[in-house]
Each structure stands twice: as structure tokens, then as C-alpha cells.
Image (spheres, rainbow, N blue to C red):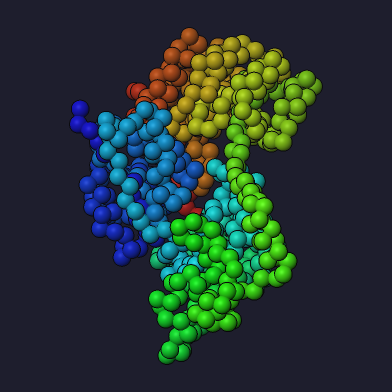
Amino acid sequence: MKKGKIFVVGFGPGDYEHITKRAIDALQQSDFIIGYKTYVELIEHLVTAKSIVSTGMTEEVSRAQEAVRQAEAGHIVSVISSGDAGVYGMAGLVYEVLIELGWTEKEGIAVEVVPGISAINSCASLLGAPVMHDACTISLSDHLTPWTIIEKRIEAAAMADFVIAFYNPKSGRRTRQIVEAQRILLQYRNPATPVGLVKSAYREKQNIVMTTLAEMLNHDIGMLTTVVVGNSSTFFYDNKMITPRGYQRKYTLGEEKQPLRPHQRLKKEAEPWALDQETGIAATGYEELEVKKQVPEQIVPKKSSFEMATLALSLVTKQAQPKPTFIEQKMEAIFEVAVSPGVANKFFTPEQMRTLADLTGDGTMEYTPDHQIVLKIPTDNPQQIVERLEEVDFLVAPVGDVLNVKACDFCYGEKADSIPYAEALQAEFGGMKLPKQLHVGFNGCGMACYKAVFDDIGIVYRKSKFDLFIGAKPVGRTAHAAQPVVEGLAPEQLVPLVRQIVEEYKANAHPNERLFKYFKRVKKILNFDYVDMATKIEIEPAPCGD
């Protein structure tokens, strides 16, 4: 079989003039383009691919998996990232997915990472020259990194006086992180420290704000904003943010003749604070006469009597240098799992609740609309967690893009005839990995008060048989119920039919493609033809005019 190839393409800020020729060539060679939908829209006019797969913000892993799948099938694939693909982009995930499958560079599919301009560079160019000295980037998104680790990195960067570029500073639901970052920085930085806010650099809605560390939160900050915080020497001048190249100025601007010539500035006598390039040890005893003759008096450091005595003592006793302290950040494994009392049960027992409290510890518990409690527990032994949950009769399910069976409570069990079928669906399909989370709604009688018809697959038990619905869109202006496809299905045919629908969807849907989108795209699932269930409503203008 012909080997495919994966390009991991960084296309820069999104402006055509700032994308490299190599990136354009890679995009135009590709059979498939895979990326976050906003990024796809930015480069869509540059590509000729036969298929473009766009997914949501948090679907990075599924994008990488789909890229590998298509490349292994012999296709050329471009996985796109804005900025540089190796800076909070897709490059690492693509390699991780390949490694998980046993990939090697010699035997496996070809991978080429095409670099692009990262946000710290593009935003710095619009602000002036804020990154002229040591700088770092920190993402404030705790989607993949625990906030406790991010806090430590912010504090370390603040203490070390780095220029800092904050990526992903704020989103609609994630608002506290930038507030906490400002609080930490204000412990180490002057409130007047210059800050630049750049939104949508080199794009149509570009916006640039010059502000200070104390005032930065008074301005609009979102996911498309990069926050650049200056160091202690950064200053504003004529609407430009500038960081000098060095802390110790070894040159005099405006003077025709410099105090030290270039070749003198590079000697260690002129930079007594610097490390020796061969030994890696700072020089000592700078006050010798020879040094004084060569270096201006004002830059020759003076040692106190106590410092000289301590130095002499260490040389006489050959005092051992202290052992270096290595900082190793412990990466906690966060185990996510969903629990419920059962498919047809809404009652928790006291023992179950005590078990939840005991297991969760410093983790979190969240009740969801799916009739489940999602646990996020720091642990190195997830299997032990699962065993303890099952010991108290919890139904345990994975979290993510999986199949979830939701059932009504069957009027406290009075209408119990269909309960075994709901449990059979859960036993066979519950937790199945799919392109996107899929809900199977199950109603135990014809009243359908549980509203199963507003799930991806709706099942209603009526007159000892089942009615089947597929493809609901429960939210948005075009929300609609699922399409009825079968009426009066014999009970023994239910599980096999659902299996066929799920298997077709799993095999053919794009990553992050909901069932209703897949049905609309392919126009047919099994022998069921797609019917547009969305009702177009004409909205009358307001009586008062504009």
C-alpha cells in the first residue's frame, strides 16, 4: 500500500502575507485538511483538498487520530495550527498518537512539521520590541495542565523577571485564571509594569491595547488575545512597548565615542558579573589593580571585608560546593469517571454517597444533565477507584466521546416491562468510544415524558413494541426533535438495529461530528432517508422599527 504523509502546518497569525511558502505548498499537496474550525476558515481559500475536516476547540486528540488514520490509508494530510504548530499546537499530539501505535521514523509514515510565526512573535512586532530580553510563554488554559502547576510557573517567571506572553488567557467559561495571574505578578512586579494586549494579530478584527499590570483587567481579554507583560526594565514610548537588550547598559546612546569599544566589552574584565565560558563559574577578586587599570572604576564591584574573609576561608578549607537542588514537578494523574445509580434508578444510597466523598478527596464531583456524577480524582491507581465504586453498586462509565444511555425512572418501576431492554443497551453500548458523544434516550411508555425524542437516538416503548427516532438537535435556533424512522419494532430487534446504526456512524463520521450532522451530510443511515426536521420560522420585525 502507498504510504501517506502528515504535514503538521503552522500557518502563522492567519494573514496571507505571514504564511510561509512551504506551508502553502504543504496545504496544496494535501488530500485532507484537518483542524479547528476557526483555523480551517482562515486558510480554506488556499487549499484544494478533496476533504476538509473541522472540529471543535477541545478535540485535539481526535484530530491527531484522524490524521494518522488517513495517512495510514495512503493519503497526504495536513493538520493545521495557527501560529507555530510546535508551540501549543498539534505537532506533539500527532507524534504522541503515532508513538502509541508503535510508529518509527524509518518504517512508519512520513511526518513533516512546517514552522510558523508564533503569537509571541507576531504580537511583539505589533507592540514594538517587548521581547528583546529573556522571555517565556505560559498558557493559562487548565484544560490539559492542572492549575496548581500553572500557578508555580507564573510565580517562577515573575520572580525571575522574565517578559511573559500569556496564551489562552480567558474564555467564556474560564475567567478566573487571568485574574489569578495578575494577582501573582503583582507580588513581584511594579503595578506600572507595561502590558500589551493584542487581539487577533494580523487579522481583520485586530486590536492593540497598551496598558499596565494594575489596569490590564479593565480591558477586553479573550481567547484570541495574547497578553505580553514586560519585565522590570520595559518601558512605553510613543505608543510602543520596548524592553532594552540588557540590564547593565554597556553602551551610551547618543555618544559618538563609546566608553568601551566592542572588543573590550566582550572581555570578562568588562563583564565581571558574567560566568566564565569554560568553567561556568563566576569570576572573583575583581578589585585587583590590573582590572582597575582596564575597566572604568564605576563598574568594578567591591567586596566587603566579610565577603573577602568568607571567600578566603572557603579556599583554605576547600569547602565543598553545595549539591544542586533539582526541581522535579510531580505530574498528578487525574482520573475522570462518570457514575450513576443505574440505567433505571435515580436513588443513591447513603453508602454510595459516603464512598463518593471518601474517594474524591481533593478532587471534584460534578452532577451533569446526563444523570451522572463526574468525578475527577488525583490517583495513580484508577482501577482501585473503579473497584470501590462497583462494590457499592454504582454504574461506572468513561467520560468523553462515548455512548451514554439515559433512561427515564420508569415511574418508580411501575412500568417495568421495558427495563431489561434499557439495561441490555447499556450493557452492550455504554461507554463505547465514538467520534462524538452520543446519547441514547429511552422512554418506558408512550407518554414519552422523559423527552427521549430529543436525543441522538430516541427509543419509546409503546404497546409492547418500540418506536425509534434518530438525529435530534436539542439546542440552537434550529433545534428540532429526532426523525421518526421505525414504528412498532419488535423488542428482540431493538439491540441489533441500534448496533447497526452505531456501527455505521462510528465507521464513517468525521471526528467531533454529531449524529444529526452526519445524517444530514450522508443523507442516509441504513435504509433510512434523511428528512430535514428543522422548522424555518420567519421572525417578524419589531413593531417599533429599528
Left or right side of 524 for 396: right
Residue 517 seen in the figure = no
Q: How many marks?
A: 0
As displayed, is residue 408 above or below residue 265? above
As displayed, is residue 22 above or below residue 227? above
Left or right side of 310 for 194: left
Q: 397 or 214, which is in the foreground?
A: 214
* The furthest residue to the top: 492
As displayed, is residue 67 above or below residue 430? below
Q: Position of residue 432 (x, y in %)?
A: 49, 23
* The furthest residue to the front: 316
- Quadrant hosting residue 397: top right
Q: Position of residue 532 (x, y in %)?
A: 40, 38
Q: Position of residue 525 (x, y in %)?
A: 36, 27
Residue 238 seen in the figure = yes
Q: Residue at x 42, y 36 (%)?
A: 96
Q: Residue at x 64, y 30 (%)?
A: 379
Q: Residue at x 54, y 52 (%)?
A: 139
Q: 197 or 47, which is in the foreground?
A: 197
Q: 263 or 78, which is in the foreground?
A: 263
* The furthest residue to the right: 350
Q: Residue at x 71, y 31 (%)?
A: 360
Q: Position of residue 1 (x, y in %)?
A: 20, 27
- Quadrant hosting residue 117: bottom left
Q: 90 or 60, which is in the foreground?
A: 90
